[in-house]
Amino acid sequence: MDNKPEYVQTENVVEKPRKRGCAGHCLKFWWVYLIALVVIVVIVVPHQDDQLSGSNFTMSINTEVKSDGKVKARIEPFEGVMYIEDLPDHRPFAKVQFPETTSDKSQTVNITQFTMIDDMEAFTTFNTWLLHNETFRVTVEGPTKVHVKGIAKAYGVTFKKTIDMPGLRLLDGTTVTNTTVNPTANAKNGTNNFFGTVRIPNYSKVSFELGNATFHNYLLDKEIGTVFLDNISLKPGNDNVYPMRATITDLGYVTGLVVQKPYCDKLNGILPFKLRGKSVINNGESLSYIADALATGNQTVQIDIRGTVKRSMGLDLGCTDDE
């Protein structure tokens, strides 16, 4: 029978229990052993296994473990779960295997692990929150034991740390430049007739190895075709620049709109296109947990159609609306 006392460690220090020897100290100072969990990097890429169809990803956690160094202790390896703090059910979307650590004043713990997705719905919800929010709270929690030097007993504790995780802000700030159009291409047969360069900001700490992504393309709520981005790898920062290709099935609708007010005068020939996720394919595997998240919202992208026509065809589009 295990008589080792158990404790739950959060950010708040619990009052020291009576007559438990080192238990009170372990409880009081446990938070300094693993409190510096500051960066979580989720590398969303499927493990290369033909028998696994988008049901896994690679996770990396980079953390600095700090303590005052006065108490020599060893913290057993443990399995932690991750969940969105502000969802009431606290449904785990991932599991993390933490290695053994010590109470040295400072040590770096880098974890990179292949992770099976046990709950696809929960993981899709995580990606959806990541996509839509500027920040949101993620909790890492798991039971382990502390071994203090010179004391035979191991003291059970539960590590629980909540962090503010930066989100993608619905990819706000995405730009499309250097656009050209080929009016003779037969888009209805699937031939690309619109091209450009896309820059996608990633405000989060998450890297996405997406592969090939497609998006529904809308103009004033009318679907006008499909946008294709190939071999996409979104790293944190604003250096995610890729060629874009698209099939626009109704170019007449686009050019007819750009010569009307206010687009032809006040907006200088710029039209507000909306993109919504359609599919994400990585090495032949469908990443539904990314595609479904991208399908939950529209991203508005302003594109200079007047400049596109000028570059591609040498035509100057003015206003035909006399009102």
Image (spheres, rainbow, N blue to C red):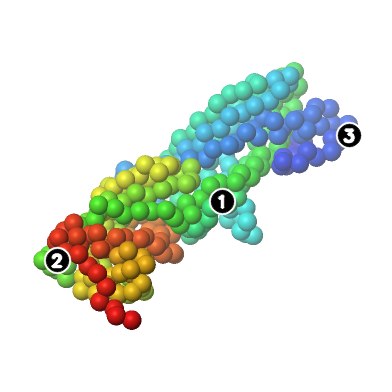
Question: Which amino acid type is shown beneath numbered disc 2?
Answer: Pro
Please name the residue shown 20% across and 64% down the image.
316
Q: Is residue 107 above or below residue 291?
A: above
**Closest to the observer: 75 or 219?**
219
Q: Earlier in the sequence, mark 3 or mark 2?
A: 3
Q: Which circle marks residue 257 in the picture?
A: none
Q: Are marks 1 and 2 in contact (CB under 8 Å)?
A: no
Report the residue marked by disc 2. 183
Horizontally, residue 175 falls left or right of residue 179, namely right
Mark before the other along the chain sequence, 1 or 3: 3
Q: Secondary structure at mark 1?
A: strand
Image quadrant containing the N terminus: top right
Which element is circle 2 on?
loop
> Which label belongs to residue 135?
1
Q: Measuring from the top left, give residue 123's x and y in whole percent.
A: 48, 54
Separation of disc 1 and disc 3 at Cα?
40 Å
Dot in front, 3 or 2:
2
Would you name the residue on which mark 3 appears? 18
Residue furthest to the bottom in view is 323
Query: Which class describes the residues within 10 Å of circle 3: few (<14), some (14-19), or many (20+)?
Result: few
Q: Alpha-carbon distance for marks 3 and 2?
A: 81 Å
Q: Residue at x 47, y 51 (%)?
A: 168
* Res. 252 image quadrant: bottom left
| Label whose residue precedes the other's in the sequence (1 or 2) | 1
Disc 1 marks a residue whose amino acid type is Thr
